[in-house]
Amino acid sequence: MNRDGGNWLTGVGFTMLTCNSVLAVYRSKNDTWSVAFVVSAYFALLLLFWCLRLYERTAPNAAQQWKLKLAVWSLSTFLTAMFSYKVALLTPWPVALIVWGMAGTVIMGGYYAFFIHHNHL
């Protein structure tokens, strides 16, 4: 894969993401909350991929790397919470508790991996 110029598969992925997001917004144009969900998830994913790309290009132990880690973790947490909320709405309360428990575990595990255990990897 070409790291500097990207590759065609990345373009296809972003095209598919954009098309699916546009279709989802079109289908739920009368539901403001669903449109807001799709638009915020779309832009959060774009920001997440952009921050990951910047992180890959940053020199190890650079001051900017910590800020990018924080941005990646924050965006990942935001997306995890958003999708967990949507899934929990559709399930009975015992399953919703499991969904939220799993989401919390993933969020805390990501924090541990990024900020506490990062020197040992």
Image (cartoon, grey):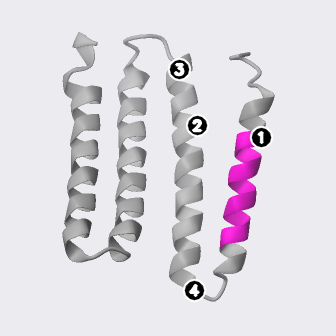
To which quarter of the image does residue 108 belong?
Answer: top left
Between marks 2 and 1, how big is the CA–CA gap? 16 Å
Q: Secondary structure at mark 4?
A: loop
Q: Is residue 28 above or below residue 97?
A: below
Left/right placement of residue 44 relative to residue 93 reads right
Between marks 3 and 2, how big is the CA–CA gap? 10 Å
What residue is pinned by disc 3?
A: 56
- State if disc 4 and disc 3 touch (CB < 8 Å): no
Disc with the residue nearer the chain's start (2 vs 4): 4
Q: Nearer the viewer, mark 1 or mark 3?
A: 1
Disc with the residue nearer the chain's start (2 vs 1): 1
What residue is pinned by disc 1?
A: 12
Name the residue: 60% across, 46% down. 46
Left/right placement of residue 69 relative to residue 117 reads right
Q: Nearer the viewer, mark 3 or mark 4?
A: 4
What residue is pinned by disc 2?
A: 50
Q: Secondary structure at mark 1?
A: helix
Q: Residues within 10 Å of mark 4 (few under 14, many from 20)?
A: few
Name the residue: 40% across, 62% down. 82
Which amino acid does the dot numbered 4 rest on?
Asp
Q: Residues within 10 Å of mark 1 (few under 14, many from 20)?
A: few
Image spot of residue 49 (x, y percent): 57, 38
Disc with the residue nearer the chain's start (1 vs 3): 1
- Magenta segment: 12-24
